[in-house]
Image (spheres, rainbow, N blue to C red):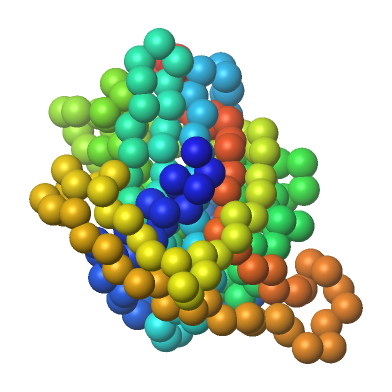
Amino acid sequence: MFKRLALIVLTAAALTGLVSAGVFAGGGFFPTFPGSVGFTLTNSGAVSATIALDPNGPVASGAPATPTGTFGSIVVTRQGVGSAAATFQVQPSSSLGELRFGCNLLLTNQRFVEFAPGVPGLPLGGPGGSFGNWLASDVTVQLFAKLGIALVDPNNPNLVLRIPGIASVNSQRCESFPKAKDSLDFLMFGGILGKTTRASIPAYPDRTIAGVTDPTQQWTSGFLILDVNIGFWVQPGTTTP
């Protein structure tokens, strides 16, 4: 499954097109803390997600350093309902920053999970401009709607009901970049592309930072694969999945 998700990252880039799209190396700008405006984080354990990402930027200051950098795929699963998936490109000015350190697992909490040490629930993205993060707000709203989870009031899209955030990480790993001699088989994506093709994979560069001894400030190669629990920030009286 992990290799399949890594291939989806490649396909996300192929389908979307490499686009030059915040400014901190390990993390970046954080969305508004929902707790400061009356929301409370709840986690029923019924919603989870798998994220596959090429965590190499830059995000906003030029073209990514790797062929699929800043592109990824997310699969959200709701127990008893099913799964919904989307491909994405990391949004600028998010908690992921400029993605200089690649698949450095020591940075997962500050990138994806915590507003501050011991304070989980960083939004994935939206809804609403104040709560935007690395996943585009419209993608976030549509993704959860497929699972029967309304993030905004259907009668008033400006009224935020639920804000999905990462409550905890179940597992994380770095999946090796493909070799230049490999090829990408699009057969599994035939329903999207309408045909079967094969494309050679360009080489992925080594971005090791010479002379750096602090492991939290060093680049690590590979695709980032995360399995996480999703919690929801809600106003008092709002139900959660």
Which residue is painted at 64% across and 68% down in the image? 221
Question: Can you name the residue that lies furthest to the bottom here?
Answer: 210
Which of 168/66 is in front?
66
One can see residue 96 in this view: no
Q: Tell me where residue 188 appears, x and y as whole percent.
A: 29, 44
Q: Quadrant of residue 76?
A: top left
Q: Is residue 39 above or below residue 222?
A: above
Which residue is painted at 36% across and 76% down in the image? 21
One can see residue 201 in this view: yes
Q: Is residue 142 above or below residue 198?
A: above
Which of 94/221 is in front?
221
Q: Tell me where residue 28 appears, x and y as whole percent.
A: 58, 67
Q: Tell me where residue 139 appears, x and y as whole percent.
A: 29, 47
Which residue is painted at 42% across and 77% down in the image? 202
Q: Tell me where residue 172 appears, x and y as whole percent.
A: 66, 45
Question: Can you name the residue that lies furthest to the left here?
Answer: 194
Question: Can you name the residue that lies furthest to the top here?
Answer: 80
Question: Can you name the residue that lies furthest to the right here?
Answer: 213
Q: Is residue 91 above or below residue 144?
A: below
Which of 97/16 is in front?
16
Which residue is painted at 43% across and 26% down in the image? 77
Side of 222 relative to 12 (left or right) = right
Side of 241 relative to 87 (left or right) = right
Q: Quadrant of residue 241?
A: top left
Count up the numbered dots: 0
